[in-house]
Image (spheres, rainbow, N blue to C red):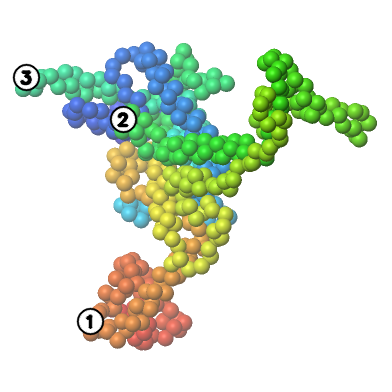
């Protein structure tokens, strides 16, 4: 059955008339509701009106959102924030020469083996187009900092069946998703209720000025949803329904940290040196003459004629009055005459509790364990049991980020499979929830955790050895203690039979049966 995608008709000729690809919006047209579909995806909802006329009205809202992206980018340049973001990226996308950074997992997908092979092949092609092995960390960083990721999907217009030819990234400040909702007023029980009659989604692309991030509403391009791959952070402001990103909650702690650091520096500079206070006796001189007399004395002592050995010249080092230098104060007749005293410097210049508190607050806002950011805490290569609770929370946080970022692969894989004729839209709708992605993890800590878990399980099996056949069965121990699945048990039993038949191991030992024998 032919389908339409990107304006192209894909399928066999002469069978059925072209039928557009079924999307969420098309399916929702059959359902009567008073709200549009999926309000919390960061799109701007438009109620009727012309596209470009409404776009002119959007300039203020878009400017606020673009200013937010600009703030996120400036925050990422702050050393502590950059270090935290780098830690998150290093844990989320692990790249080395041994394994690929991400693989597709189709174990739960109910399709034939040949279809699985084609899906895996197309996924590898997508990774090559993205150059994910070399640029995976950069792509993840852009998505994490900007909170949005846009790609323009480019096809071969003459042969769309070839699939995606190129993916060009789009600056988030130049494009935005818009949802146009048309509603009809329906009277129910004497009450007027608005019912959604049609929903249209599209993207608006606008060029911005080179020296600013403010969009120019005079030029705008309406783009079909199928031509853009749009992945956002999933963090939505419930009030404005705007994507705010993962750095949103770190804005206030970072601003407070900058202010307190500036205040500490200013205080230390102004209070660190000891300064002299000159009380000059001016007698009964009038105010104007007293000030002139005071200035003459100041200039007499502050003008410093020195010999410059590098040039052989006489240099006049004139030092002007400032808050960091000495104070000159006039004193009237009847006082104690001319006097020179000392103004002591600050006594609490070493206190940094406020800075440390706000720095720790910033780390908590960035979801990074504080122990990672403190220089005095060394790198622990010990047992995995020594990992702190903060590290476990951070590990789960990275897994959530990976799961959200995987929407990029799902969208591109859907488009690629339909264009290549591997699957139809209804087939994709049936399996997309079962597709998962496996990201490469840090090899040392993964092996360390798995080896310790296996060691603990085998110790439990050893302790239960005398109770096998009395209180516990071998099947129960293999499933609930060793946590072997049905497939694992079948594979291990098959391997044991082959090794017994080839003479590599001897059969019949109860110990072997307990830990992996071929019979229950």
Quadrant location of the N terminus in the rendered image: top left
Please report the residue visible at 23 percent of the width from the left and 84 percent of the height from the top. Answer: 470
Q: Nearer the viewer, mark 3 or mark 2?
A: 2
Give the left or right position of residue 402, taking residue 186 as reference: right
Q: Secondary structure at mark 1?
A: loop
Please report the residue visible at 53 percent of the width from the left and 63 percent of the height from the top. Answer: 380
- Between marks 3 and 2, how big is the CA–CA gap? 31 Å
The residue to which callout 1 is attached is 471
In the displayed structure, 62 sits above or below 352; it is: above
Number of marks in the image? 3
CA neighbours of label 3 inside 10 A, class few (<14), some (14 to 19), many (20+): few
Q: Outermost residue toward the left?
A: 189
In the displayed structure, 472 sits above or below 176; it is: below
Name which quarter of the figure residue 496 lies in: bottom left
Q: Nearer the viewer, mark 1 or mark 2?
A: 2
The tag on residue 190 is 3
- Between marks 1 and 2, how big is the CA–CA gap? 59 Å
Q: 302 or 441: nearer the eye? A: 302
**In this view of the protein, can residue 510 be seen by the observer?**
yes
Name which quarter of the figure residue 20 lies in: top left
Please report the residue visible at 33 percent of the width from the left and 82 percent of the height from the top. Answer: 463
Which badge, 1 or 2, comes first in the chain's sequence? 2
The residue to which callout 2 is attached is 239
Which badge, 3 or 1, comes first in the chain's sequence? 3
């Amino acid at each position: 059955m032919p389908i339409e995608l990107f304006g192209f008709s894909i399928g066999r000729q002469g069978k059925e008339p072209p039928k557009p690809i079924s999307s969420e919006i098309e399916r929702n047209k059959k359902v009567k509701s008073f709200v549009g579909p999926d309000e919390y995806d960061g799109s701007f909802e438009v109620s009727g009106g012309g596209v470009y006329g409404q776009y002119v009205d959007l300039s203020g809202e878009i400017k606020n959102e673009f200013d937010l992206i600009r703030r996120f980018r400036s925050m990422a340049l702050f050393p502590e924030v950059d270090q935290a973001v780098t830690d998150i990226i290093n844990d989320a996308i692990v790249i080395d020469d041994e394994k690929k950074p991400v693989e597709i997992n189709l174990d739960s997908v109910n399709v034939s083996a040949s279809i699985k092979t084609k899906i895996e092949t197309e996924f590898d092609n997508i990774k090559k187009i993205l150059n994910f092995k070399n640029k995976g960390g950069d792509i993840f960083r852009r998505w994490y900092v900007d909170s949005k990721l846009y790609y323009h999907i480019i096809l071969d217009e003459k042969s769309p069946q070839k699939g995606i030819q190129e993916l060009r990234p789009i600056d988030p400040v130049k494009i935005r998703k818009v949802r146009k909702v048309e509603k009809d007023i329906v009277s129910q029980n004497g009450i007027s209720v608005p019912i959604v009659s049609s929903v249209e989604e599209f993207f608006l692309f606008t060029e911005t000025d080179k020296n600013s991030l403010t969009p120019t509403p005079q030029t705008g391009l309406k783009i079909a949803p199928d031509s853009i791959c749009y992945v956002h952070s999933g963090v939505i402001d419930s009030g404005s329904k705007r994507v705010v990103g993962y750095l949103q909650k770190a804005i206030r702690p970072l601003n407070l940290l900058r202010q307190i650091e500036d205040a500490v520096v200013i205080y230390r500079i102004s209070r660190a040196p000891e300064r002299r206070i000159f009380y000059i006796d001016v007698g009964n001189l009038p105010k104007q003459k007293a000030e002139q007399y005071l200035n003459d004395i100041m200039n007499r002592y502050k003008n410093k004629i020195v010999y410059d050995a590098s040039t052989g010249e006489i240099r006049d080092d004139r030092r002007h009055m400032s808050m960091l230098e000495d104070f000159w104060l006039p004193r009237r007749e009847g006082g104690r005459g001319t006097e020179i005293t000392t103004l002591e410097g600050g006594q609490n210049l070493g206190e940094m509790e406020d800075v440390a508190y706000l720095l720790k607050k910033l780390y908590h806002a960035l979801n990074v364990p504080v122990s990672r950011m403190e220089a005095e805490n060394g790198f622990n290569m010990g047992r995995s049991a020594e990992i702190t609770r903060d590290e476990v929370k951070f590990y789960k946080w990275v897994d959530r980020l990976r799961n959200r970022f995987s929407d990029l692969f799902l969208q591109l894989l859907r488009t690629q499979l339909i264009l290549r004729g591997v699957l139809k839209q209804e087939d994709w709708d049936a399996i997309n929830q079962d597709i998962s992605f496996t990201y490469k993890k840090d090899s040392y800590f993964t092996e360390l955790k798995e080896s310790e878990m296996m060691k603990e399980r085998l110790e439990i099996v050893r302790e239960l050895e005398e109770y096998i056949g009395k209180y516990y069965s071998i099947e129960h121990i293999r499933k609930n203690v060793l946590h072997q699945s049905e497939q694992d048990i079948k594979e291990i039993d098959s391997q044991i039979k082959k090794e017994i038949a080839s003479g590599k191991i001897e059969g019949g030992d109860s110990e072997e049966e307990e830990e992996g024998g071929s019979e229950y």
